[in-house]
Amino acid sequence: MDNRKEFLTKEFSKRFQGKPEVWTRAPGRVDLMGSHTDYNLGYVMTMTIDRETWLAASPRADRVVNIYSVDMKSGAEFSLDDLKKDEKTPWVNYVRAVAKYSMEAGYKLKGFNAIVHSTVPFSAGLSSSAALEMAIAMTFQAVSGFEMDPVEMALIGQKAENHFIGVNSGILDQYSSAMGEAGKTILLDCRALRSSLVNISPELKIVICDTKAKRNLLGSEYDDRRKQCEAGVAILQKLDPKIESLRDVSFEDFDAAKDQMPDPVRKRCQFILEENQRVLDLAEPLSKNDGVRLKELFSSSYFGARDLFEIGAPAMEEMYQSMVNAPGVVAARQAGAGFGGCMVALVHPQKVDAFSASVIKEYKQRTDLDAEIYAVEASDGASII
Ligand code: GLA
């Protein structure tokens, strides 16, 4: 941490006058259960990871934001009075978007100079964009002198993605980054926008397995899944007008309606119903280290994601096989939106090194790709440092 501060102070001084006065951070996230349940207003078991986006900033007297990313090696300067999308430095659009929707919510923002640095891998399904949004929102609060409720902050980040960036995502990523807690996972209710803390047994390590496979079709496939779930809701609503989302559908309702559902709508709905139930079922075995149950829940989530929700990828299948064959593995599944990116395993703590070595070797043999494997701990949600 001291090294990181020292490094960012130097980077800051290269570009701006003086030293940073404000430090903020926000973590990435990994979901332990609940793929695509968020926009269906269901449940997710999610946790922050100890990979974080940091901002080193100093307030400005005017309404200008000047920001530079050490990772992207690019930056931009813009006025808070002129927030237009700019494709020259696309990552800065997240900054503009958070500014825009914070102001729309009534907050009075001041300008700042800042350096950004992130240890959340980009485009891997670990929410690097939500981490940036939440760190930016924290920075605006610190330099402008106001406090925002973290759930409101998450909603502003989601609005930024949906309306400015044009990604139709749910609340999962921003909520996790804003509301996560060190050492815990959270059971998030995406309709109530409330969460409760769940213990992870000390006998389990959370290990991220990055397939390093490119996620090309992500945008359009993601939107298709949303539309198919909405089509399912429309059919179910004819049977019961009280149904507003798949969250309201019981297995009995689904059984009564499924013959009227064309494929793939039926498969998509079945997955979401089952996945929601798995989230609720996960808290107990996760805190008690019930290996048999954890394996059951994780593997049925993976098979459902692959065969019913169809968010798999050839590289994910090879990674799944490499994970379940490795020493020390308790359970393994997909993470994030799917279609490549990262997956997640529960591993016995003493076996993490052996697990990693085995996965890297087997995955390389199967795909010729170099996987990246690392254990993570949950860190606190977005904060001023
Ligand atoms: C992406 C989206 C989230 C969520 C997940 C799938 O990470 O940004 O809102 O839908 O996919 O669970």
Image (spheres, helix red, strand yellow):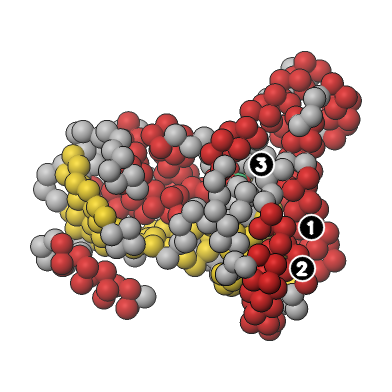
Q: Which mark is residue 299?
A: 1
* Of marks 1 and 2, the one in the foreground: 2
Q: Is residue 368 left or right of residue 109?
A: right
Q: Is residue 92 visible?
A: yes
* Of marks 1 and 3, the one in the foreground: 1
Q: Is residue 282 left or right of residue 146?
A: right
Identity of the residue drawn at 16% across and 44% down: 64
Q: x, y percentage for residue 10?
A: 20, 72
Q: Amino acid at mark 1?
A: Ser
Q: Is residue 152 visible?
A: no
Ligand 1 within 8 Å of disc 3? The answer is yes
Q: Secondary structure at mark 3?
A: loop
Label 1 with label 3: CB-CB less than 8 Å:
no
Q: Amino acid at mark 2?
A: Val
Identity of the residue drawn at 62% across and 68% down: 368
Residue ID for mark 3: 37
- Name the quadrant of the N terminus: bottom left
Q: Is residue 337 left or right of residue 69?
A: right
59 over 81 or under it: above or below: below
Identity of the residue drawn at 73% across and 26% down: 232
Residue ID for mark 2: 324
Q: CA distance from mark 1 to mark 2?
A: 9 Å
Of the image marks 1 and 3, the number of the one nearer the N terminus: 3
Q: CA distance from mark 3 to mark 2?
A: 24 Å
- Name the quadrant of the C terminus: bottom left
Of the image marks 1 and 2, the number of the one nearer the N terminus: 1
Q: Quadrant of residue 247?
A: top right
Q: x, y percentage for residue 336?
A: 60, 51
